[in-house]
């Protein structure tokens, strides 16, 4: 019913191999029993843990936070053009300690929050894990509402070069113009 557990296994696998700073995603199917039998939905899951970026000489890395995950979720929704008028609801979930559900057009699109510490510890995860799970079928259904914006391709290509000609002084401009 959720893709969370497979991602936690991957996080532990990587942390045990000296790779603690992770940003993972996965597309997959989730199954749920309903009144009509079983229901299959495509989901996109995102996990973040460790540092938000690699350290370099000019800046130090900060730990990933809930807002790092929220920024990635909002950026994805903007790219898909379905970010208008989102509503948030408090998340009641046995797997996430805190977070919220993001609804667009009154449909739940994504649940995001941080994984409960005891659940992460039971998998052997050594740091906080932030998790988002999209109902990808709903995202695709809502993306149909998005109007695609485009511009026609130019008929001629843009040229940055300038042409120079070396001519004899006796050649007049009207001669060049008539040849061209």
Image: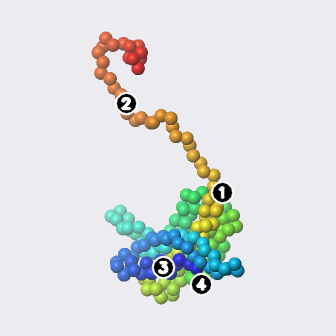
In the figure, is residue 54 to the left or right of 36? left
Query: Which dot, 3 or 2, sits closer to the camera?
Result: 3
Q: Residues within 10 Å of mark 2 (few under 14, many from 20)?
A: few
* Residue placed under numbered mark 2 in the picture: 162
Classify mark 3: helix, strand or loop.
helix
Quadrant in which the C terminus is drawn: top left
Element class at badge 1: loop
Q: CA distance from mark 4 to mark 2?
A: 66 Å
On the rendered structure, is 34 left or right of 4? right
Q: Which residue in the protein does label 3 denote?
A: 6
Q: Residues within 10 Å of mark 1 (few under 14, many from 20)?
A: few
Please report whichever mark, 4 or 1, sits nearer to the chain's N-terminal start: 4
Q: Earlier in the sequence, mark 3 or mark 2?
A: 3
The mark nearer the N terminus, 2 or 1, is 1
Up/down of 114 relative to 102, above or below: below
Which numbered tag is attached to residue 145? Answer: 1
Q: Nearer the viewer, residue 155 or 41?
A: 41
Of the two numbered discs 4 and 3 in the rendering, the one whose residue sits closer to the viewer? 3
Under circle 2, the secondary element is: loop
């Amino acid at each position: 019913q959720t893709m969370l557990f497979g991602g936690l296994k991957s996080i532990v696998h990587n942390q045990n191999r000296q790779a603690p700073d992770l940003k993972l995603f996965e597309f997959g199917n989730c199954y749920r029993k309903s009144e009509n039998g079983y229901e299959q939905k495509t989901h996109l899951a995102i996990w973040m843990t460790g540092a938000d970026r690699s350290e370099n000489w000019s800046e130090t890395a900060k730990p990933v936070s809930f807002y790092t995950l929220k920024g990635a979720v909002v950026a994805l929704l903007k790219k898909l053009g379905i970010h208008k008028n989102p509503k948030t609801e408090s998340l009641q979930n046995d797997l996430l300690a805190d977070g919220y559900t993001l609804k667009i057009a009154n449909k739940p699109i994504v649940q995001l929050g941080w994984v409960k510490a005891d659940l992460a510890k039971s998998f052997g995860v050594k740091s906080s894990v932030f998790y988002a799970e999209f109902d990808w079928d709903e995202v695709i259904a809502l993306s149909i509402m998005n109007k695609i914006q485009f511009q026609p391709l130019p008929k001629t290509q843009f040229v940055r070069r300038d042409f120079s000609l070396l001519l004899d002084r006796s050649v007049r401009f009207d001669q060049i113009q008539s040849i061209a």
